[in-house]
Image (spheres, grey):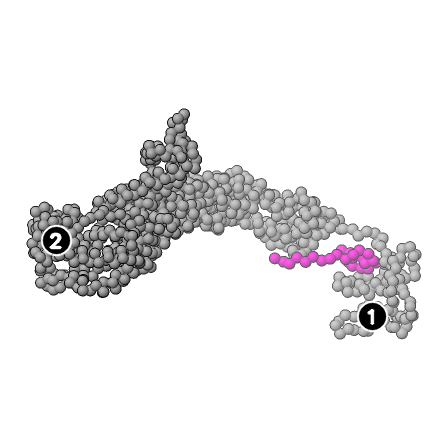
Amino acid sequence: MSKLVRTQPLATGQVKRSSDHHHYHNTNNSCNNSSFNNNTALLGFGATTKRLRHNNADDENEENNVEIVNMTDTATANTQKRANFSALTVANPNGVNKLTPNLGNAKPGSARKLVIKNFKNKPKLPENYQEQTWEKLREAVVAIQTSKSIRYSLEELYQAVENMCNHKMASTLYANLTVLTESHVKANIKQFLAESMDRHIFLKKMNECWQSHCRQMIMIRSIFLYLDRTYVLQNPSISSIWDMGLHLFRLHIVMNTLVQTRTVEGLLMLIEKERQGDTVDRTLLKSLLRMLSDLQIYQEAFEAKFLVATERLYAAEGQRLMNEHDVPEYLAHVDKRLQEENERLLHYLDMSTKWSLIHTVEKQLLSEHVSSILQKGLSGLLDENRISDLTLLYNLYSRVKNGLVELCLNFNCYIKKKGKTIVIDPEKDKTMVQELLDFKDKMDNIVNTCFYRNEKFANSLKEAFEAFINQRANKPAELIAKFVDMKLRAGNKEATEEELERLLDKIMVLFRFIHGKDVFEAFYKKDLAKRLLVGKSASVDAEKSMLSKLKQECGGGFTSKLEGMFKDMELSKDINIAFKQYSTNLQNELLASNLDLTVSILTMGYWPTYPLMEVTLPAEMVQYQEVFNKFYLGKHSGRKLQWQPTLGHCVLKAWFTGGNKELQVSLFQALVLILFNDSDDLSLEEIKAATNIEDGELRRTLQSLACGKARVLQKNPRGRDVADNDRFVFHADFTNKLFRIKINQIQMKETNEEQKATEERVYQDRQYQIDAAIVRIMKMRKTLTHNLLISELYNQLKFPVKPADLKKRIESLIDRDYMERDKDNANQYNYVA
């Protein structure tokens, strides 16, 4: 494109420049040199002015003169008139000629006046200047529109436009240009009105027409730029040349119903093909959609129809794929579709469509199927721990209104349903706690990884666990206590100390969900007692760590008795050291017994209550007991010792044919085995008479010795159970690769009687707590209605209780005169002081 040069017109005054020939005109005299070319006129302007000044200085009236002060005449009085500029004698090396003043001949202080006169006649444009100039411009515009060469230079055309604007012809020029452009645009419509035309070809023709129109308008505007920057800017109601071109194109081509329909349908066809997986010309789409946007008809002509087509497509697709695909496949498809639509926005769609388009896709593929997707596939995803699919599900549902709310509700329902199957089934009691721990870990991982630690999901998880774990009263608490017991026993080599600590932390999480924490306390206390007394605790540090966790969770009142048990064991160690020193002084008395006695002194209030069981001990043991009684009561007068054989244990030396062994047994097992020192064959009745052990306990003891892994006794006849007529023989040929053999595991096993006794004790403790709470409330309130009393009790009691049980306790307290019914209102209670 030629560079347009804007020249500054010369000021009209003393010098006049004709269109046909150039000369300088003076009112009195004309220059001898009447004709110069353009260059000479511009170069000689200064010198000529000086000459004119000499000739006219004294001839004119003062009224019409313009006085210029401090201009000194540079010519001398005797200077001869030179014919032309070539006669100048002083030449500058740079090629610019100067007149050197003769300072010697100049009069000091003399000043001459320069007088500039107006033209006698105003300069006039040539005749038909407007018509001739417009014809030249029209010819150029047509050449641009028909892609032909322009005869005139762009500078010349620009100057022509500038001259017309400066001589108040701008409005006519703008009108003529509008008419000329309109006629050309109208002529282009015919190619788009053919009856049958392939849609793709039609779109290409439309794009070519649009691109040509844009190029033409840019070229035309560059020529008429002066018009655009003066006349158009001064008249706000008039469109710029570019906008005028857009308006005409929109009015005569795109707003034509047939053309617009074909264009939009063609665009929708291409987009639909691309959505079906075909490759399309994205450049063509981008250009035509940009055209609609530039013409300001994108929304009304295209967007509405495009969104309707999108909605129709994805509505049908959503229904079809929900029936055909599994949830993971469907979610992947939805994600793929959303990515595709975002790519279309980046490549050719207008960004103003983004919200509407993405919302439409989300509505048809997700919002319409929120419940169906969750009902169909959430359980499967959670069961199979499909982390990536669950993450995708969360991300997609976060885009939909109420999507995460629905997901959270279904997540909650799944946990309750799955957890209930773990807790309710009695057959799963053995594995319940481990399954709960694994389930909790799995759900925590999903919340943290897939749901980005969303607080609502974390709270929903806790609420669901608390709900299902308490659907089976007391049992989960009991089993959690037994699980802890199993992990804290000696011989549990599954975990290191760090792993055990982490496991205890996880167990505490389950413990927090339990309502009946008193049940946990009762069973934990019973098992802890066994671990401490039988010496089966794996680690004192682990025991104390668990104790501190319970204390932190439930307070000092909950663990005070447990802490007392540890204190008793510490004190017992000191007592046994003192007893050993005491017994060395009595060595003569105890020498024959060849026994070593260790005693645990227990405070009855701290430890579980054990049934008192009288058994017949060997004389040596009885003697040792008496010595210890004397020692202890001598130190602590006023105390009473009650020997409890149930949890006693012994180490016996045994001689077998295969070699000597040490047997680690319970006290009851020891009593039975010692009988075989005097006899090789004994019946059940004989053993019972000799030991005085309770029948059920004796049968369990004999079963462990004759029917377990280490059979140091043989039972006749053989069998798993001990019958009344069975006889027992010492197994002299017993062999085992270990030197010390543990047979006292039976002590650690819980009998049904023990379990029932513990449950009964918990129930009894609860009765006392309810009674205490009722009396405490009534003492403070004095008078209270039944419903308010029940409500207060539920607020204070920390274990689950039924209204019927509370009513029974109220009746019991009325019978015992702690409170009474109001005489006038049977539904109201009064406190009896």
Can you give x and y, in whole percent of width and height, for residue 731 in the image?
Answer: 9, 57
Name the dominant secondary structure of the magenta segment. loop
Residue 330 visible in the displayed image = no
The answer to whether residue 16 is magenta is yes
Q: Position of residue 490 (x, y in %)?
A: 25, 58
Residue visible at 89% across and 55% down in the picture: 64
Left or right: where does residue 601 sit relative to residue 829? Answer: left
Q: How many marks?
A: 2
Q: Nearer the viewer, residue 345 or 428?
A: 428
Image spot of residue 340 (x, y percent): 43, 48
Label 2, label 1: how far apart the Cα atoms are: 146 Å
Q: Which residues are magenta?
A: 1-25
Residue pointed to by mark 2:
706
| Residue 674 in view, yes or no | yes
Q: Residue, x 75% and y 63% (percent of image)?
A: 39
Front residue of 630 and 157: 630
* Other-residue count near label 1 (Cα within 10 Å), few / some / many at <14 / 14–19 / ≥20: few
Judge by depth and name the residue closer to the eye, 615 or 662.
Answer: 615
Q: Is residue 13 left or right of residue 393?
A: right
The amino acid on which the numbered mark 1 sits, given as a three-letter code, is: Leu
- For disc 1, the marked residue is 99
* Quadrant showing the C terminus: top left
